[in-house]
């Protein structure tokens, strides 16, 4: 990850910017069915570790003077809709990021198993300036 | 349950001929607005790292002079190129590649975006 940031540093002109946008692990994706939030998904330990490594990589390139934080940061909400609960199960089985339902979430979704189920997740971003 | 197909099917997330996930990303322009607005991107050269099917690259391309968009998935880049052709987008160059392979790109950019790729 530090390598990727260093490579970006080589490709971006001095004074240019790098935007780091990725799912915000501190906010669990919310699962919505029947017009209400019914629970959330939890990340895998691997994904948590990757996120920590990415955060550490950003800290390292800032500390080493390659970039500076502009202070511009925030969250964009992304939505995804699954056709029914089986499709959500399938997505969860295949996801490299999300590992399981939070306690009680799947049972709360069961009454809506044949309905579309929406996921809303936070994508955080941080704007760095290339020095 | 009938699943509505998206306007631009993405072969890398379909199985057995049916669309598994119907995705509704943020409305066009919402991320550009969050990232500083059109003024930030107007006339710039942008590198989109981890572009996927090019969703954000197309948004940025409305304002940028040129966008180079890379993703390690050949399937995703294929979809992105087809979308670009279908919509007549000429200022986006889609390439297969990862965040670690940026040195293969010779150009310099005003803005690089890590799209979920760090």
Image: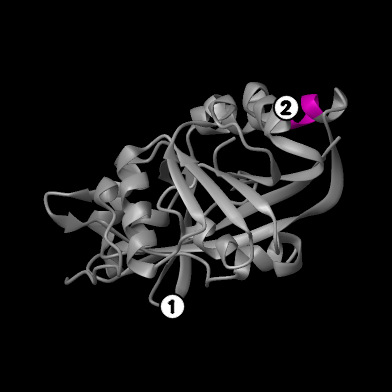
Q: Which residue is mark 2?
A: A56
Residue B48, image x and y in percent?
Answer: 57, 46
Label 1 marks a residue whose chain is: A
In which quadrant of the rendered image does the N terminus of chain B lie? bottom left
Q: Secondary structure at mark 1?
A: loop
Residue drawn at (49%, 31%) of the image: B98
Residue drawn at (26%, 64%) of the image: A84
Q: Can you tell which quarter of the image residue A61 is in? A: top right
Q: Nearer the viewer, residue A108 or B45?
A: B45
In which quadrant of the rendered image does the C terminus of chain B lie? top right
* Residue that extends furthest to the left in the rendered view of this protein: B16
Q: Main secondary structure of the magenta part?
A: helix
**Span of residues in magenta:** A57-61
Other residues around mark 2 within 10 Å, as few (<14) / some (14–19) / many (≥20): some
Other residues around mark 1 within 10 Å, as few (<14) / some (14–19) / many (≥20): few
Residue A18 drawn above or below residue A1: below
Label 2 marks a residue whose chain is: A
Residue A32, image x and y in percent?
Answer: 44, 67
Residue A90 visible, this angle: no
Give the spatial CA distance, label 2 vs label 1: 38 Å
* Residue that extends furthest to the bottom in the rendered view of this protein: A35
Magenta run includes residue B19: no
Magenta run includes residue A58: yes
| Eye-nearest disc, 2 or 1 | 2
Proximity of marks 2 and 1: CB atoms separated by less than 8 Å: no
- Return the mark for residue B22: none
Using residue B92 as the reference point, say whether residue A33 is left or right of it: left
Residue B81 drawn above or below residue B32: above
Q: Nearer the viewer, residue A2 or B92?
A: B92
Residue A57, image x and y in percent?
Answer: 71, 26
Q: Which residue is mark 1?
A: A35
Q: Can you tell which quarter of the image residue B84 is in? A: bottom left
């Amino acid at each position: 990850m530090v390598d990727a940031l260093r490579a970006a540093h080589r490709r971006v002109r001095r004074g240019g910017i790098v935007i780091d946008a990725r799912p915000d692990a501190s906010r669990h994706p919310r699962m919505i069915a029947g017009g209400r939030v019914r629970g959330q998904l939890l990340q895998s330990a691997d994904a948590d570790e990757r996120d920590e490594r990415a955060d550490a990589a950003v800290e390292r390139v800032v500390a080493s003077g390659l970039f500076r934080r502009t202070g511009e940061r925030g969250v964009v909400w992304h939505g995804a809709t699954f056709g029914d609960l089986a499709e959500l199960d399938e997505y969860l089985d295949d996801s490299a990021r999300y590992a399981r339902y939070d306690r009680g979430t799947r049972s709360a979704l069961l009454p809506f198993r044949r309905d579309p189920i929406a996921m809303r997740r936070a994508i955080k971003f941080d704007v760095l300036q290339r020095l | 349950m009938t699943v509505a197909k998206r306007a631009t099917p993405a072969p890398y997330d379909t199985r057995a001929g049916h669309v598994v996930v119907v995705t509704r990303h943020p409305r066009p322009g919402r991320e550009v607005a969050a990232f500083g607005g059109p003024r930030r991107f107007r006339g710039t050269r942008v590198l989109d790292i981890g572009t996927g099917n090019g969703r954000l690259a197309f948004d940025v391309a409305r304002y940028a002079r040129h966008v180079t968009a890379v993703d390690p998935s050949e399937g995703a880049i294929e979809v992105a190129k087809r979308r670009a052709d279908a919509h007549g987008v000429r200022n986006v160059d889609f390439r297969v590649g990862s965040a670690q392979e940026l040195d293969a790109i010779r150009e310099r950019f005003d803005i690089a975006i890590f799209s979920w790729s760090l």
